């Protein structure tokens, strides 16, 4: 896979990272309208009670209309960062590699951000570093509905590309709930550590 166009995620799913790891050039969309219920502000982890959603609260414009993703502000009236970190700790403290990555990841939940795109961009770079993956990275200069690259932005991903990366590994609570696919890439990192990059590079994806 050469170039892909993707939306900057909150952490990012295993499938999204598999696409990016297998690409040589990742173009992150910066000029689209913010859409609810996407990876822009949501991630899923495997907790003691099963699949758990962590969602960043954002400020909505209400009747004023759509806002660009890059302009979306985080609603910090909720103590969401502390809650998300506690949820990650509870889910993964006993995983094989949590202690190896916790300092770098805890940082993102201690630093205050007001802009969602800035938060996600910082988190993206942290995860990229932990995975040890390098690819050419750029951002769109304007919004184009049709692009000359493999497009996995949310609208395409939901409507016509329901691909899930075929990555199988042992999860902390698998004995209770079985294997849950396509969680946040954090689930893979905490459970497989340095092997995560190999699994992402070699998993099956629809190209």
Image (cartoon, rainbow, N blue to C red):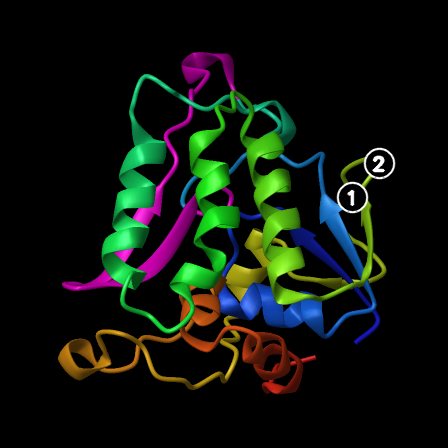
Q: Is residue 82 left or right of residue 103?
A: left
Residue 25, by quadrant, is: bottom right
Q: Secondary structure at mark 2?
A: loop
Magenta residues span 38-65
Q: Percent x, y for residue 2?
A: 84, 71
Residue drawn 50% across and 84% down?
166
Residue that numbered label 2 is attached to: 141
Image coords of residue 143 (percent x, y): 76, 38
- State which quarter of the image contains the N terminus: bottom right
Q: Position of residue 135 (x, y in %)?
A: 80, 62
Q: Residue furthest top?
A: 64
* Disc 2 crowd, CA 10 A, few/some/many (<14, 14-19, 20+): few
Vertical arrangement, residue 155 with respect to residue 116, above or below:
below
Q: Rounded to the nearest whole Å, what is the CA distance between mark 1 and mark 2? A: 9 Å
Q: Which residue is rendered at x = 72% and y = 66% of the image?
A: 133
Total numbered badges shown on the rendered structure: 2
| Residue 118, label in figure | none
The reply to whether residue 184 is visible in this rendering is: no
Eye-nearest disc, 1 or 2: 2
* Residue 159 located within the stretch drawn in magenta: no
Q: Residue at x 33, y 70 (%)?
A: 95
The quadrant in which the C terminus is found is: bottom right
Q: Residue at x 51, y 51 (%)?
A: 11
- In the depicted view, which residue is nearer to us: 96 or 158? 96
Residue 37 lies, with reference to residue 187, above or below; the image says above
Which label belongs to residue 144? 1
Q: Is residue 155 above or below residue 119?
A: below
User: Within 10 angstroms of label 1, few (less than 14), some, or many (20 or more) residues?
Assistant: few
Q: Under tag 1, what secondary structure?
A: loop
196 versus 51 height, above or below: below
């Amino acid at each position: 896979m050469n170039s892909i166009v993707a939306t900057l995620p909150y952490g990012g799913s295993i499938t999204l990272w598999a696409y990016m790891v297998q690409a040589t050039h990742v173009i992150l969309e910066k000029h689209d309208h913010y859409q609810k219920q996407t990876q822009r502000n949501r991630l899923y982890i495997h907790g003691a009670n099963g699949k758990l959603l962590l969602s960043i609260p954002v400020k909505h414009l209400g009747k004023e209309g759509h806002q660009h993703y890059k302009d979306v502000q985080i609603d910090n009236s909720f103590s969401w960062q502390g809650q998300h970190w506690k949820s990650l700790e509870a889910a993964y403290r006993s995983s094989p590699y949590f202690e190896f990555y916790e300092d770098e990841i805890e940082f993102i939940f201690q630093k205050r951000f007001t802009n969602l795109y800035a938060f996600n961009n910082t988190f993206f770079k942290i995860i990229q570093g932990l995975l040890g993956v390098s690819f050419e990275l750029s951002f769109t200069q304007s919004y184009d509905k049709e692009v000359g690259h493999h497009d996995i932005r949310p609208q395409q991903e939901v409507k016509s590309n329901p691909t899930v990366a075929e990555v199988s590994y042992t999860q902390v609570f698998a004995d209770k709930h079985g294997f849950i696919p396509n969680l946040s890439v954090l689930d893979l990192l905490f459970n497989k550590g340095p092997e995560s990059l190999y699994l992402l590079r070699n998993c099956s994806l629809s190209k």
